[in-house]
Image (tube, rainbow, N blue to C red):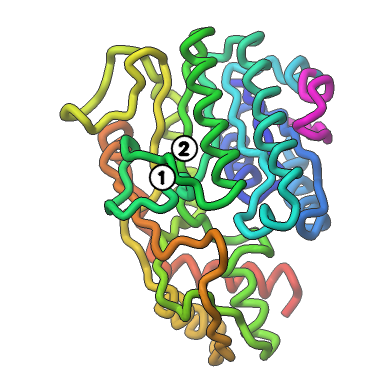
């Protein structure tokens, strides 16, 4: 099959594109190589993908509709997977315009592209952050998501809503994923695991927010990629819900579905730090800090819909995933 994947120099996009190439597909990757974090890390990811003659990289910004259209014309995609975004909850407090440009305007460009090209399936990356201030756990796809805590969250929720309208108006089958704290080799330097490992190895303090009284539904990146690839052929079709009533998020008026991707096994932040210390082989210098604006105390996914759709649930424990990241980190930085 032929794929157009946005964000292939990013953490998740790189892993997914590599998997698609291993399966023999043709992938055109679109990425802006933005300096939000170390661009050399992004270039290194693309360099690995470019070892395959089935991969072509197109560099451009999501906001540039012409550049995106050129990538699409090159790809002639059967499937579009939109992973590119301005990421980061905390950075949205500093540079909100970047989120409006990429996550709203850029995502709208992708939707317009899908309207024109009519792929068999459009898949979009959203976030667990859309559950915001929800107190009901575990978070299920049909829960209310009307209380975003940051602009980042608001832009991702807005993307979901725009995508639903396009699915309804133009019949583009669309699945939106809600990712839960994805981690693993080649991860992002702005994420907690990267900072914890870098700081602990360097003997520098690591910042632990919320006094450590938080928990996250950590999802190992290989598990996430497995879930996404299984969902590619599961094309939403209006009127064909799965499971008992109330389980499926399939829209009543559009070929549109939202799916959580996580294992439903939250891990306490202090337990996570313990796992980092064990993998690194030395204690961390813990700097306990209050909760940051926009943070939520816990994330906890229901994986029931994912299991009903593809008979799979992410299950790699942090006791395996964290050491895998530490091994990659040491190798990549020559430690």
Name the outermost residue toward the left. Answer: 244
Can you give x and y, in whole percent of width and height, for residue 92 in the image?
67, 52
| Residue designated by label 2 | 177
Q: Secondary structure at mark 1?
A: strand
Near-viewer residue (189 or 98)? 98
How packed mark 2 is, by other alpha carbons closer than 10 Å (few <14, some 14-19, many 20 or more), is many
Residues in magenta, as a range: 53-69
Choose between 283 and 255: the one closer to the eye. 255
Q: Residue at x 70, y 86 (%)?
A: 202
Lateral position of residue 105 relative to residue 131, left or right: right
Q: Are marks 2 and 1 in contact (CB under 8 Å)?
A: yes
| Callout 1 crowding tier (Cα within 10 Å): few <14, some 14–19, many ≥20 | many
Residue at mark 1: 261
Identify the mark nearer the N-term, 2 or 1.
2
What residue appears at the point 57 percent right and 21 percent down from the top-left corner? 79
Q: Against 330, is 124 above or below?
A: above
With 50 as the anchor, is 140 left or right in this view?
Answer: left
Q: Does the stretch in magenta take in 151?
A: no
Q: Examine the image and state in which quarter residue 193 appears.
A: bottom right
């Amino acid at each position: 099959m032929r794929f157009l994947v946005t964000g292939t120099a990013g953490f998740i996009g790189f892993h997914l594109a590599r998997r698609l190439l291993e399966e023999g597909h043709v992938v055109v990757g679109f990425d802006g190589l933005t300096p939000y974090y170390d661009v050399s890390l992004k270039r290194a990811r693309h360099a690995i993908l470019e070892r395959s003659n089935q991969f072509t990289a197109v560099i451009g910004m999501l906001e540039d509709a012409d550049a995106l259209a050129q990538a699409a014309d090159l790809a002639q995609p059967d499937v579009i997977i939109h992973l590119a975004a301005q990421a980061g909850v905390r950075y949205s407090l500093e540079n909100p315009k970047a989120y409006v440009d990429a996550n709203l305007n850029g995502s709208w460009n992708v939707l317009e592209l899908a309207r024109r090209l009519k792929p068999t399936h459009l898949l979009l990356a959203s976030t667990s952050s859309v559950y915001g201030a929800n107190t009901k756990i575990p978070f299920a796809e049909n829960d209310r998501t009307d209380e975003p805590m940051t602009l980042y969250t608001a832009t991702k929720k807005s993307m979901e809503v725009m995508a639903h309208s396009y699915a309804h108006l133009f019949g583009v089958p669309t699945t939106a994923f809600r990712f839960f704290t994805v981690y693993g080799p080649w991860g992002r330097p702005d994420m907690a695991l990267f900072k914890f490992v870098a700081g602990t190895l360097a003997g520098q303090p690591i910042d632990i927010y919320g006094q450590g009284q938080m928990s996250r539904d950590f999802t190992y990146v290989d598990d996430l990629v497995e879930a996404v690839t299984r969902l590619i052929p599961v094309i939403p079709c209006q009127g064909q819900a799965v499971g008992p009533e109330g389980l499926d998020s399939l829209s009543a008026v559009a070929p549109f579905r939202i799916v959580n991707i996580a294992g439903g096994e939250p891990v306490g932040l202090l337990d996570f730090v313990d796992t980092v210390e064990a993998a690194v082989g030395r204690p961390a210098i813990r700097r306990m800090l209050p909760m940051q604006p926009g943070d939520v105390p816990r994330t906890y996914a229901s994986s029931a819909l994912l299991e009903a759709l593809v008979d799979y649930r992410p299950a790699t424990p942090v006791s395996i995933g964290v050491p895998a990241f530490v091994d990659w980190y040491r190798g990549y930085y020559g430690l």
